[in-house]
Image (cartoon, rainbow, N blue to C red):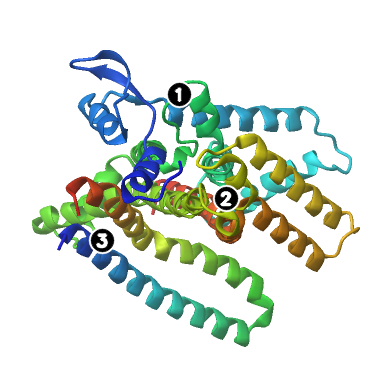
Amino acid sequence: MELVIIAAAIMLGLGALGAAVGMGLLGGKLIEGTARQPELGPMLQGKMFLLAGLIDAVPIIGVGIAMYLIFVVAPGVGA
Amino acid sequence: MAGENPASTTEYIQHHLQNLVYGYHPEQGWGFAKGADTAETAQIAAEMGFMAIHVDSLAWSVGLGLIFCWLFRVAAARATTGVPSGFLNFVELIVEFIDSSVKDSFHGTNKMVAPLALTIFVWVFLMNLMDLIPVDLIPYLLAKAGVGYQKIVPSTDPNVTMGMALGVFVLMLYYSIKIKGTGFVKELTMHPFNHWAFIPVNLFMETVGLLAKPFSLGLRLFGNMYAGEMIFILIAMMFAAGAGAGFAAGGLHAQLFGEHTNLIFWLLVFALVCGICWLNLKGRLSTGKTVLICAVIMTLSGGAFALAGGLMQWGWAVFHILVITLQAFIFMVLTIVYLSMAHEDH
């Protein structure tokens, strides 16, 4: 069995796990904050998108590397 | 571009991920990297070493930068004190947005930060916007003209994104040393443990934190754009699967042209779909009917594969519009924040 594919799978899985938990906490706090002070809604939402992009950064770098491994490296190695 | 066996689908993907490289090869001399297939081209490009240039990334990024400068110059020359309209209004919207972003995050005094933020935001946004152009369109046209490989999205090239991040890093260091002087060294060696014995530990931790900033800045943009482009390429293979198939799977195109791809045919279909959508915009056709007619056109012209591929590309493109804008915004905000940290003088 080709280990490159397993490596890509681990990268994708663990990255997705971290990103999902982080986003869930962030979104929960946004809803809570908006429920407390509805007039801050738009401002909080804008800040949430900014932080979502920052949280996503390392998992998406992992996705990019994993895609490279699966489609460029694995066929080359002869999976 | 046609064919369903693994070798040629892999070749299709790798072909679209290969940059146009120009450099000095130990055996072939000066020239573009070109091999019998993409794997060989990649190897030749790697053998050219560090100083080989990605001509396509360079051309598209510089070209888009010039377009940005020209457009905003035209708007600035036409600016009046009256109520703006159309293009001028749009440019003023962007400038006001950058102004408020800089005022929110930047706490020093520097005349260069706002123009830098504007340049970064619009330039990165334009580079990312190239990702929404159909995958095969420009490489296919250029292949007819003899250019073998082309990647039209400069931000999918890690050289471009890391280059910009490096530029921001150099500015960070420059302003840190200019404003804080020896205070910068003190900050690196005495935080967080304020004792001379801990200097190596502090230096190590602070250096890692300092270097993480440009690396994450550049790689975040690269990762997002590379993953997006990769998914566009993967969905594009859906269209190739219909080539040479029967009428239900391949539609009119497979019947008329078999294994080959005919650009004129698809441009006509595209114009037709655009015309239907334009009618909808003018209010002459309801949205439900528009979607139905477009689906029928796509099914007739390319079969079930074209319909599925078209819908998936549309869905991913709409999501990608958010990612494009967000990544440009994040790059800009982080640049402003890092420069603000460099100007901080406690």
**Picture quadrant of residue A36:** bottom right
User: Which residue type does callout 1 highlight?
Assistant: Val
Residue at horizontal 64 percent and vertical 83 percent from the top: A37
Measured Cα–Cα span from mark 2 to mark 1:
42 Å
Residue B43 horizontal side relative to residue B67, left or right: left
Vertical placement of residue A75 versus B15, above or below: below
The N terminus of chain B, quarter of image: top left
User: Which residue type does callout 2 highlight?
Assistant: Val
User: Which residue type does callout 3 highlight?
Assistant: Ala
The residue at which mark 3 appears reads as: A8
Look at the image and tell me whether residue B48 can be seen. yes
Rendered location of residue B334, percent (x, y): 46, 52
**Which chain letter goes with mark 3?**
A
Residue at horizontal 49 percent and vertical 39 percent from the top: B153
How dense is the environment of label 1, judged by Cα within 10 Å: few (below 14), some, or many (20 and up)? some
Vertical placement of residue A23 versus B139, above or below: below
Residue B206 horizontal side relative to residue B322, left or right: left
**Which chain letter goes with mark 1?**
B
Residue at horizontal 35 percent and vertical 42 percent from the top: B11
Rendered location of residue A15, percent (x, y): 32, 67
